[in-house]
Image: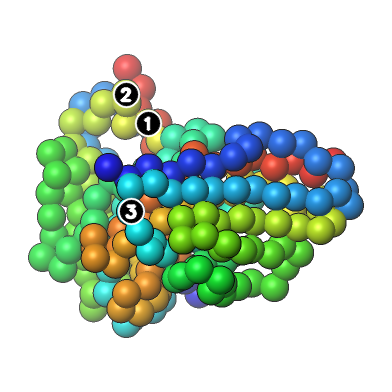
Amino acid sequence: RKEVEQDPGPFNVPEGATVAFNCTYSNSASQSFFWYRQDCRKEPKLLMSVYSSGNEDGRFTAQLNRASQYISLLIRDSKLSDSATYLCVVNFGHTGFQKLVFGTGTRLLVSP
Amino acid sequence: SQTIHQWPATLVQPVGSPLSLECTVEGTSNPNLYWYRQAAGRGLQLLFYSVGIGQISSEVPQNLSASRPQDRQFILSSKKLLLSDSGFYLCAWSVPAAGNTIYFGEGSWLTVV
């Protein structure tokens, strides 16, 4: 089993649609989780952390299911500018040190 | 505010040539520093990390080495490049006191020919 696994997509959605991505991870001891966004040929940028109780940032909602070892990202009211690759990231490290393991990413294409 | 600078942005190197990528962080002290590589169609792979000057940990056996001569400087090197070293190299930093979120530099595109 891969350490962090994502559906590579692409997910093709029209503007205004709601889209969700899931990600599974193998390390049940992991304590921190993130979603990063990566535009073509650019560095990844932090989109949001994922908290146990779930969290929302504007149109973006992240959820964590520890029992099933998966996290999700929901994007509401998709914009053209949301087109990017979304990386699921899990910390396999220990306190004070981040050993982030990245999924290969899910590509999102939002069309007019 | 903290910033990270990485260079060169792009380079094309022949097989067997040396490599040096440099990264500096500004606006913070004693950061954790990282080198990642992203090969075509693959996820980011952690190559090296450092929690302090002169302290380097390697995650995977490879043709590369890293050094941290100063607190906010991280260097990735190779004596002889292989074709398989081609990829997108990213320097990153984090600070435990600031939640340890990792922030990336703009990356260096390396093509070995």
Mark 2 surroundings within 10 Å by alpha-carbon count, few (fewer than 14), some (14 through 19), many (20 or more): some
Say which element carries label 2.
Answer: helix
* Rendered location of residue A52, percent (x, y): 16, 68
Q: From the viewer's perspective, is B50 left or right of B61?
A: left
Looking at the image, do the residues carrying marks 1 and 2 touch, with CB atoms under 8 Å apart?
yes
Instruction: Give the numbered dot on residue B28.
Output: 3
* Rendered location of residue A91, percent (x, y): 36, 69
- In the picture shown, does residue B55 fall above or below B65? below
* Rendered location of residue B4, percent (x, y): 43, 44
* Residue for point 43% across, 49% down: B25
Asked if marks 1 and 2 fall on the same chain, the answer is: yes
Residue on which disc 2 sits: A80
Q: Nearer the viewer, residue A20 or B18?
A: B18
Q: From the viewer's perspective, is B57 left or right of A39?
A: right
Residue B24 visible in this rendered orientation of the protein: yes
Instruction: Give the numbered dot on residue A83.
Output: 1
Q: Nearer the viewer, residue A107 or B95?
A: B95
